[in-house]
Image: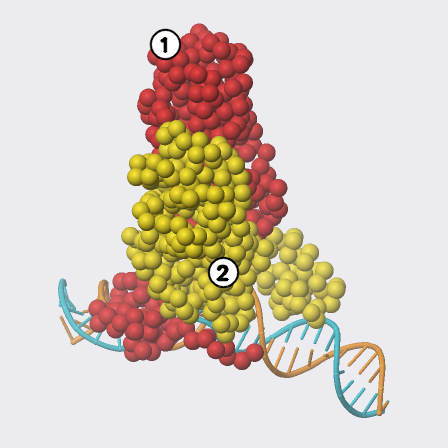
Chain colours: A red, B yellow, C cyan, D orange
Amino acid sequence: MGPRAGDEERPTLEDVAAFAGVSRSTASRALNDDAYVSAAAREKVLAAARDLGYSPNQAARSLVTRRTGAVAVVLSEPESRLLDDPYRAAVMRAGYRELADVGRQMVLIFSDIREDLSRTVRFLEGGHVDGALVFAPHRADPLPKALRLLRIPVVFGGQAAGIRRGVHVVDFDNEGGARLAVEHLVAAGRRRIATIAGPQDQSAPIDRLAGWRKTLLDAGLDPADLAEEADFTLSGGATAMTALLNRHPDLDAVFVASDMMAVGALRSLDAAGRRIPDDVAVVSFDDNATLAPAMDPPLTSVHQDPREQVHAMVETLMQLLDDQGLKPRQHILPVSLAVRASS
Amino acid sequence: MGPRAGDEERPTLEDVAAFAGVSRSTASRALNDDAYVSAAAREKVLAAARDLGYSPNQAARSLVTRRTGAVAVVLSEPESRLLDDPYRAAVMRAGYRELADVGRQMVLIFSDIREDLSRTVRFLEGGHVDGALVFAPHRADPLPKALRLLRIPVVFGGQAAGIRRGVHVVDFDNEGGARLAVEHLVAAGRRRIATIAGPQDQSAPIDRLAGWRKTLLDAGLDPADLAEEADFTLSGGATAMTALLNRHPDLDAVFVASDMMAVGALRSLDAAGRRIPDDVAVVSFDDNATLAPAMDPPLTSVHQDPREQVHAMVETLMQLLDDQGLKPRQHILPVSLAVRASS
DNA sequence: AGCCCGACTGGGAGCGCTCCCAGGTGTCGC
DNA sequence: GCGACACCTGGGAGCGCTCCCAGTCGGGCT
């Protein structure tokens, strides 16, 4: 094929060394600021690298170090959800930032359920990345089980489908958050406290529903028939709220398992002529920074910070990277209640 | 440091070859389904690879092939914008899909303006990726200029800040889209057609504003004082709409430069007691799949498909990858008007 | 019979880097 | 005065792969 035009001969470490008048080893040491390089040599090498426009070949480097400097962030969720899920968007941002802070590059992977997961596994196996942060909220998702066999460290964000031991997990206290929300409503004198639950094929919504139920029972209230399941979307929330109002026109509060669904619930309540919080108090979950405070009225919401979760996950992964023997643990992050005008 | 626990000795090609009883070369040929391998040998190698759980070391491979199989998607935008910009979310999805379709891995890079762009450049230089798709809508963004010097092929999505030649660009026909929108309003008999423009430090909104202005002039209408600039957010759109209504209570149509701003405009119009489309017709831009049809009334919007744009960008990049000599060109994608009840 | 050519195989070289080891200096302590 | 030891340097080996080249073999042609 012959030498291509535009192939501009990338300088190698050897070139830099020759230009600086030192050996390859010394050049390498200078660039990786190793000890045992004289100031003069370091200076010359750095200047040479700058002049030649040198940048190290990562493939060569990681071939010998067995480190790529990259970490995968795997989002396993059906197409539709990701596009308008602000929490996932925040996770991507946070992942990028937190990994950059520890000098790692994020490689985003979308792994839909209906898709072949073998490609994802093959990629993670292929030595492209040093480790993976995995978000796979669906219980039926085969991904987590497949990833257990991986030769790279994996940290899960949220419970890993069906697997309770032997994996590293950083999750929020979903049940505790629901408890906070409901206790807040009980303390405010509410007695008919309904809930709009999220999809019950995912761990987080299951735990939130359980927290709602237990707290009601603890307070001597009856949860029977006061729960409606929806799909985390705005319209799903609206539909569920309407159904609840039809069944229980006397309800005086609702705990909604996500901000987005709460927006829908607000619309239904509004359409039904209910005043918030006078007639019906609303508390939601997520406390999305752009959504919750912007509503009318602003939403009281259980606060969970994606950045905090990702930070803990990165921290765990970094530990794993230099100590394979680390014991798997479930790291449960506390949540708090951001009280606003809706309750 | 000694051999680590859990270091499980990844099998190499050599191991597979030995296991299969052939040479390294033959094993390599079988796995890369090269010609000139006997069916028997291929069979044995494939079986061996399966049994040993072999997966090729990408670093070693790309060291010699000088290909990584990865492509960067660079999003250069301030933090806040990305979180709730549905168009960007769609771009990420589309990027992942389109690249996967050509057997490439997407590496997402967020490159904020205020951040050091040197890290981004260093990464792209470092041989981590074979090429880059860059979205840098801000005219003042220094990134595009920095990327020109890169030794890897780059394709821009939307006009590249200040650079008009020597770069590959895939853009939508923003001015043409605005023209479509305004002509539609004119044809419907509207005469006081205002606009809510996007930030005028970006190419796309500039072109949309220009299209609005020119079309009005062509129709013999006066654009003076009928434009208001906003920041692409919902609340920005609402504020701008209110300002326009105050200045021109008699306006009978508005062309809004994005769906999100149109949602805000709808609220302001509603609050001001204007009926849509009876009193004021609304046409927006983007035709976001989840937003535009879901509004009340559903929004007439200029349709642009992120997937189409990304597809064209990937196509161009692939051509670039096996033919460096390809002439830079501006690829302008047509847009259409999705007419709905708001106009 | 000789020969050529296509099908297939194995070994060597080398991609660009890091790490190890052998060596060369200078400084200190006994 | 000479080992001990820090500081610094250069060369060799080798990471795991692909590619090139020199082979071997068998069948069809002259």
Both labels 2 and 1 in a single chain: no
Whole-percent x and y of residue A104?
39, 52
Whole-percent x and y of residue B232?
37, 44
Q: Residue at x 55, y 34 (%)?
A: A138
Kind of residue at badge 2: Ile
The residue most toward the top is A220
Tell which subunit mark 2 falls on: B
Q: Which residue is drawn at 29% across and 52% down?
A: B114
Whole-percent x and y of residue A288?
38, 33
Q: Nearer the viewer, residue B137 or A11?
A: B137
Q: Which of A53 and A342 is in front in this view?
A: A342
Please identify, in this view, whether the residue under mark 2 or under mark 1 is nearer the observer: 2
Helix, strand or loop at mark 1: loop
Q: Which residue is drawn at 48% across and 30% down?
A: A234
Q: Residues within 10 Å of mark 1 (few under 14, many from 20)?
A: few
* Circles 2 and 1 in contact, beta carbons < 8 Å: no
Q: Please say whether residue B16 is visible from this viewpoint.
A: yes
Q: Which of A38 and B334 is in front in this view?
A: B334
Q: Residue at x 34, y 45 (%)?
A: B226
Tell which subunit mark 1 falls on: A
Could you say which quadrant of the image residue A186 lies in? Answer: top left
Report which residue position mark 1 lands on: A189
Q: Please say whether residue A89 is visible from this viewpoint.
A: no
Report which residue position mark 2 lands on: B332
